[in-house]
């Protein structure tokens, strides 16, 4: 994943959440904010310690990053993806389907 596509600053993540433009289901919550200062999308992923041990949490984050990367988003938006505990029961294809649905719900065009 390109460093240009990451959001690392806590203040930027808090601003995304405060913006309150989100969509969610029982597996994920996706927060969106338009960012006209950039020419590309940026995103961050969060998973709770209740999800499992570090190996499980890192696997979940890697999967979500890959799903976002595969969407080939062309818009200058900031995204924050929160992975819920129920997502541990999903396969990669099911996670991909759920995230695609949420991105479509937020009018984020990819592919």
Image: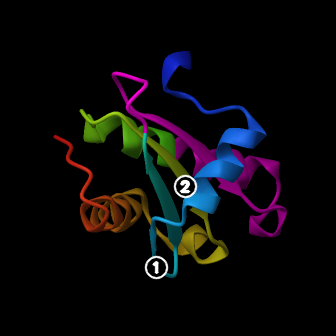
| Residue at 59% from the left image edge and 77% from the top image edge | 86
Secondary structure of residue under mark 1: loop
Q: From the viewer's perspective, tell me whether residue 51 is left or right of residue 103.
A: right
- The residue positioned farthest toward the left in the image shown: 111
> Which quadrant of the structure image shows residue 8?
top right
Please report the bounds of the magenta region as a residue range. 35-63
Q: Is residue 1 above or below residue 48?
A: above
Way the structure is coloured: rainbow
Q: Is residue 84 above or below residue 13?
A: below
Q: Nearer the viewer, residue 45 or 105?
A: 105
Disc 1 residue crowd, few under 14, some 14–19, many 20+, Cα 10 Å = few
Q: In this view, does 2 lie above or below 90?
A: above
Q: Mark 1 points at which residue?
A: 25
| Residue at 52% from the left image edge and 74% from the top image edge | 27
| Magenta stretch: includes residue 46 | yes
Q: Name the residue under label 2.
A: 81
């Amino acid at each position: 994943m390109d460093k240009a596509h990451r959001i690392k600053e806590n203040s930027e993540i808090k601003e995304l959440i405060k913006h309150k433009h989100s969509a969610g289901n029982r597996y994920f919550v996706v927060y969106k904010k338009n960012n006209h200062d950039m020419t590309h999308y940026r995103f961050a992923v969060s998973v709770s310690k209740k999800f499992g041990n570090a190996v499980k949490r890192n696997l979940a984050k890697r999967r979500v990053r890959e799903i976002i990367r595969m969407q080939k988003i062309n818009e200058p938006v900031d995204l924050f993806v929160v992975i819920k505990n129920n997502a541990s029961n999903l396969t990669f294809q099911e996670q991909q389907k759920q995230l695609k649905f949420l991105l479509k719900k937020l009018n984020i065009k990819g592919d």
